Image (cartoon, coloured by chain):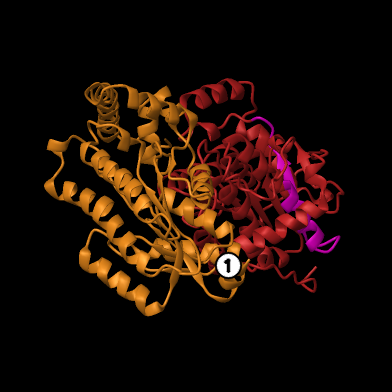
């Protein structure tokens, strides 16, 4: 009970990275609707401010925002300095920021590949390391890392991304053991693709029925994941079909899984590329 | 009897296609000035040309706004006020909240609001409230919100009104259409009885539009194409809606919910004043806005 009393008198926040994107925004809204005060970060300030105004109005919570390019070590250092100076304390951290440039490895630029590693891995590790320092000592500290269903398999067409998510999966599981007994829990979320942007929706459509049945809405995922984190669960895979896929994937040798996924993704990738080509090459249809 | 509308001005949202365009065309044909609202500048230009061709003397203007974003709704209200001022007008005779959308997957707007809740409910709520002073400046004015028979069987889940935690596109759509009826009745209660501004909710019937074809899965597209094949033309449906916007005889009619120019009984959930007040309070909080009705305004 003392925990509630302390929370009332002492501001303690939930930090969310990538908070302006589809899943990050869903986490922010879900947390706000539960009455939790928020610290939001993302690449640019304007969308964060817009979301913050709306969440303050709708849910009467405190929302602090700070834009930061998490791929940049100096920008991260600056962010942590701001947090230190502001005196904020945290009882949860949700590492959502992550990206992928979909495409074949040899067609991506080296800068794109570096950005995937810097954001998905370096950014997440640095946020986790620093925010542990500013955790509220009076409460259990909840860490949620957003990995991906892609973490369980080698993924052609998403080679670097999937490997970066594998890193987060293994890291989270190991960290969870390290911090056991210290009042810190680590939950790793491994969702399938989610319909957050029109590009994501196109990608789901391009996968056909398989895309349909593996897709879960972001709101459901955010709610389910927060419940799991509060219960101290280590791994969340939203969707029964996805849990089944993960189980089956574990039974089949990795090279075979890679070959199967490669066939599916390459065909989806080609379909999308073709659709893109057709859209761009057609003259604009009036009224369409 | 069709009254002359040549001195009147109406705002129509979602006026670049479907029911909105047909309603705007019907108003323009009767000599009214129309301010259409659309998302795409290109489609707005096209609609302006179509309407101007119907009635070369008519005053037709289009404003672009993405109604899913609250900031754009506020900006739109300011633009409408400016446009009227430029035309030397101080009053607005009617607002048709027609813009609506359907999405299959949960989508959050930049304000963090579920897309259908934002476009189908919050945008009409906020725009109506913001334009109310202009509407109250007219001798009589109407606010017509396009609801749907989808509201039957819907019930707002107050612990998760936007269905974020268990999203289903059709249920979310039905909820917003229920919200349209609740909003209309709550607004009428807030305006005095026999007030100069009267709100109605309209059931447009099943209409041949493209509502369920935008970004929805193939199965949904296919089902909608079959369903709409037995539907009305947008013009036939718009006639009933234009009736609600313009017919002088119904200003103090008891019914708030109409279909094809006839009063209809909305669902029991839609007739619950407590739910309407709860929705009103929630909507005000979500928009960071509080309506203060000025009952002393011109009659």
Across and down, in percent, residue A75 comes to: 25, 67
**Can you name the residue that lies furthest to the front here?**
A181
Magenta-colored stretch includes residue B192: yes
Q: Quadrant of residue A153?
A: top left
Horizontal relation, residue B203 to residue A69: left or right:
right
Question: x and y percent of residue A129 in the render?
Answer: 31, 62
Q: Say which colour chain B has.
A: red
Q: Is residue A37 above or below residue B6?
A: below
Residue segment shown in magenta? B181-206
Q: Nearer the viewer, residue B110 or B41?
A: B110
Q: What residue sits right under mark 1 in the picture?
A: A3
Front residue of A240/A266: it is A240
From the viewer's perspective, tell me whether residue A92 is left or right of residue A164.
right
Instruction: Please tell me whether mark 1 sits on a helix, a strand or a loop.
Output: helix
Residue at the location (68% across, 64% down)? Answer: B132
**Chain at numbered mark 1:** A
Q: Colour of chain A?
A: orange
Residue B56 magenta-drawn? Answer: no
Q: Residue at x 57, y 69 (%)?
A: B85
Tell me, yes or no, if residue B221 can be seen here. Answer: yes
């Amino acid at each position: 009970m003392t925990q509630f009393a302390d929370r009332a008198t002492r501001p303690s926040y939930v930090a969310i990275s990538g908070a302006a994107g589809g899943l990050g925004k869903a986490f922010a809204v879900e947390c706000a609707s539960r009455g939790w005060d928020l610290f939001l970060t993302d690449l640019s300030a304007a969308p964060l401010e817009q979301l913050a105004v709306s969440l303050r109005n709708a849910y009467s919570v405190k929302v602090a925002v700070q834009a930061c390019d998490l791929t940049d070590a100096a920008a991260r250092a600056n962010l942590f300095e701001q947090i230190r100076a502001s005196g904020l304390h945290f009882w949860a951290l949700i590492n959502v920021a992550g990206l992928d440039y979909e495409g074949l490895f040899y067609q991506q630029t080296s800068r794109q590949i570096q950005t995937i590693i810097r954001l998905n891995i370096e950014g997440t590790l640095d946020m986790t390391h620093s925010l542990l320092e500013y955790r509220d000592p009076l409460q259990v500290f909840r860490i949620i890392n957003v990995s991906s269903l892609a973490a369980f398999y080698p993924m052609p067409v998403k080679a670097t991304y999937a490997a970066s998510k594998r890193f987060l999966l293994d890291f989270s599981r190991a960290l969870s053991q390290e911090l056991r007994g210290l009042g810190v829990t680590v939950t790793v979320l491994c969702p399938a693709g989610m319909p957050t942007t029109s590009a994501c929706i196109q990608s789901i459509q391009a996968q056909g029925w398989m895309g349909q049945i593996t897709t879960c809405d972001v709101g459901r995922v955010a709610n389910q994941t927060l419940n799991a984190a509060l219960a101290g669960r280590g791994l969340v895979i939203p969707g029964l079909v996805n849990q089944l896929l993960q189980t089956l994937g574990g039974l089949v040798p990795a090279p075979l899984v890679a070959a199967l996924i490669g066939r599916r993704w390459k065909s989806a990738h080609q379909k999308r590329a073709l659709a893109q080509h057709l859209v761009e090459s057609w003259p604009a249809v009036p009224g369409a | 009897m069709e009254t002359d509308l040549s001195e009147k001005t109406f705002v129509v949202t979602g006026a670049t296609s479907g029911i909105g365009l047909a309603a705007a065309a019907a108003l323009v044909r009767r000599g009214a000035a129309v301010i259409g609202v659309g998302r795409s500048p290109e489609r707005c230009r096209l609609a302006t040309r179509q309407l101007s061709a119907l009635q070369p003397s008519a005053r037709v203007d289009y404003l672009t706004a993405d109604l899913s974003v609250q900031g754009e709704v506020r900006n739109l209200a300011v633009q409408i006020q400016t446009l009227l001022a430029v035309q030397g007008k101080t009053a607005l005779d009617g607002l048709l909240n027609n813009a609506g959308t359907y999405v299959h997957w949960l989508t959050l707007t930049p304000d963090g609001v579920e897309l259908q809740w934002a476009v189908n409910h919050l945008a009409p709520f906020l725009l109506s409230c913001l334009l109310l002073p202009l509407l109250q400046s007219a001798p009589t004015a109407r606010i017509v919100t396009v609801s749907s028979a989808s509201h039957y069987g819907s019930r707002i889940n107050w612990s998760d009104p936007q269905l974020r935690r268990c999203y289903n596109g059709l249920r979310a759509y039905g909820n917003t259409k229920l919200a349209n009826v609740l909003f209309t009745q709550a607004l009428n209660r807030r305006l005095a009885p026999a007030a100069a501004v009267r709100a109605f909710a309209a059931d447009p019937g099943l209409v041949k539009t493209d509502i369920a074809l935008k970004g929805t899965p193939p199965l949904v597209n296919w089902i909608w194409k079959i369903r709409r094949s037995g539907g009305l033309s947008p013009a036939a449906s718009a006639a009933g809606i234009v009736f609600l916007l313009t017919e002088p005889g119904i200003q103090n009619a008891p019914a708030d919910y109409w279909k094809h120019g006839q009063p209809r009984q909305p669902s029991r959930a839609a007739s619950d004043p407590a739910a309407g007040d709860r929705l009103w309070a929630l909507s005000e909080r979500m928009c960071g806005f509080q309506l203060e009705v000025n009952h002393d305004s011109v009659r």
